[in-house]
Amino acid sequence: MRAIDLNADLGETVDGVPTADDEAMFAVISSANVACGGHAGDAASMAASVERAARFGVAVGAHPSYPDRPGFGRVRLEMAPADLRASVAGQLTALRAAGADLRYVKPHGALYHAAGSDPLVATAVVAAVADLSAVLGRPLPVLALGDALAAASAAAGLPFVREAFLDRGYLPSGDLVLRGEPGDLLHDPAEVARRAVRLVDERRVAAVDGTTVTTDAASLCLHGDTPEAVDMARAVRAALSSAGIAVRADW
């Protein structure tokens, strides 16, 4: 049977208040990108995410960001590589301290985009992942988009896993439409579900201008904090099942 990973950004509490219905999302996905204090999340939310992951059989990935809680990690910060490496390492350590058996790392927000295109940022992020990989005695995959991050991962001997976004608009270049720009987010569960099946069947996704983007994504992402997230996740899971596509994490 064909299979695909379905991931979501979760554990993103702000001042103790959840931004998503984590309980419902954990029941549908196969991998959870858990916020670990940089942009959101705290010790309690990380522990809750670890517990849910164990209960639902979901793989746990770290979701580090720039240390930017006021901006929810969506503003690029100019940080020295050593400081950025230390910040990411601290976030990975915090999630491990909550009991997580980390299977991969996926940067968040502005750090995700910066690491995807800026070799210096990518190298700093990957260095933190490589440091933890050495401690664990196994290479932690990096889940993301972006050639700079792919190159840095390869140089460090870490697997790089490409993902595709089910609820974000694509530019013809294959980049995501910036948040706040027209077409940045999708809201229709049926449309998102069709996109998921097409991504597995054809390795293609429609860009906002109607052209087609080709991708070799091995994981599909939904954002847990969108209002329609649970409906979209359930629709995607049902559509994949109907198409004979299993949802599982091979981390």
Image (tube, rainbow, N blue to C red):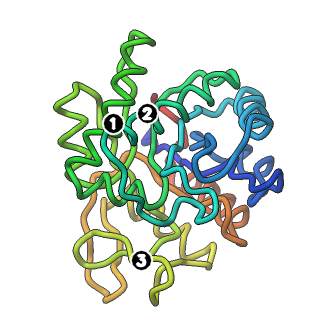
Asked whether disc 2 touches disc 1, contact meaning CB atoms under 8 Å apart, the reply is yes
Mark 2 closeness class: few <14, some 14–19, many ≥20 residues within 10 Å: some
Q: Tell me if residue 84 comes above or below residue 68 in the rendering.
A: above
Mark in front: 2 vs 3: 2
Query: Mark 3 or mark 1, which has the lower sequence index?
Result: 1
- Horizontal arrangement in the rendering, residue 202 relative to residue 84 (left or right): left
Location of residue 176 in the rendering, given as x and y in whole percent from the top left corner: 37, 71
Q: How many marks?
A: 3
Residue beneath the point at 55% across and 78% down: 186
Q: Secondary structure at mark 1?
A: helix
Q: Tell me if residue 19 comes above or below residue 100 in the rendering.
A: below
Q: Name the residue tied to disc 2.
A: 86
Residue beneath the point at 74% across and 52% down: 13
Q: Nearer the viewer, residue 134 or 195?
A: 134
Q: Which three-letter amino acid code belongs to the residue tagged 1?
A: Ala
Distance between the alpha carbons at the discs numbered 2 and 3: 27 Å
Q: Nearer the viewer, residue 243 or 57?
A: 57
Q: Secondary structure at mark 3?
A: loop
Q: Name the residue tied to disc 3.
A: 178
Q: Which three-letter amino acid code belongs to the residue tagged 3?
A: Leu
Q: Tell me if residue 201 comes above or below residue 63 in the rendering.
A: below
Asked whether disc 3 touches disc 1, contact meaning CB atoms under 8 Å apart, the reply is no
Q: Name the residue tied to disc 1.
A: 82
